Amino acid sequence: MINITGEVIIKKSEKGAYYTNTSTKKLEDEKYDYAPILVGFKKGVELADFSKIKITNGFLTHFRMDDDTFRNKIIVLEYEILSEGKSKAVADNGFAEVTDDDLPF
């Protein structure tokens, strides 16, 4: 088992799955490639999109996809919230609610 600790930004997909990214800088054009890694928490954990946490007890595991490929997943057992992200509230019409603070002007 590979233990995981440290600070990470947690993102939340539209389906409610949590993930983070790894990145690698390409030498030829100095752009970054990003790869998502799924993140699992104990039942009942709710985090806003782009929350920054410090993992104090976690480990790396994997699971098999329907096409017989494997995906890595970080399981977080204990963590501290360093900063809360923004929750994306969606109105009945399907659009996210926007406040004056969200606007760039």
Image (cartoon, rainbow, N blue to C red):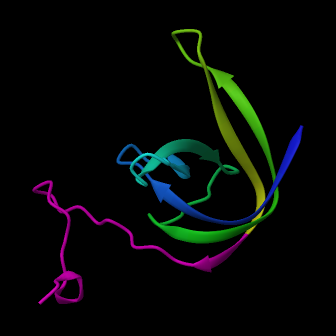
- State the residue at coordinates (15%, 58%): 92
- State the residue at coordinates (53%, 64%): 47
When asked about the image quadrant of residue 87, the answer is bottom left
Magenta-drawn stretch contains 68? no
Q: Is residue 90 left or right of residue 40?
A: left
Residue 51, position as x, y percentages in the image? 53, 70
Residue 97, position as x, y percentages in the image? 19, 71
Q: In this view of the protein, which residue sits in the foreground, 40 or 19?
A: 19
Q: In this view of the protein, which residue sits in the foreground, 92 or 70?
A: 70
When asked about the image quadrant of residue 64, the answer is top right
Specify the segment rendered in magenta.
Answer: 80-105
When asked about the image quadrant of residue 55, the answer is bottom right
- The quarter of the rendered structure image containing the N terminus is top right
Residue 19, position as x, y percentages in the image? 54, 49
- The quarter of the rendered structure image containing the C terminus is bottom left
Q: Is residue 69 left or right of residue 56?
A: left
- State the residue at coordinates (22%, 82%): 102
Magenta-drawn stretch contains 100? yes
- State the residue at coordinates (56%, 18%): 65
Q: Is residue 11 left or right of residue 79?
A: left
Count of numbered badges drawn on the protein: 0
Q: Is residue 21 above or below residue 85?
A: above
Q: Is residue 61 above or below residue 76?
A: above
Q: Main secondary structure of the magenta part?
A: loop
Which residue, as the protein is rendered here, is positioned at the far right? 1
Q: In this view of the protein, which residue sits in the foreground, 94 or 39?
A: 39
Q: Is residue 28 above or below residue 5?
A: above
Residue 84, position as x, y percentages in the image? 52, 77
Q: Is residue 100 above or below residue 8?
A: below
Which residue, as the protein is rendered here, is positioned at the far front? 28
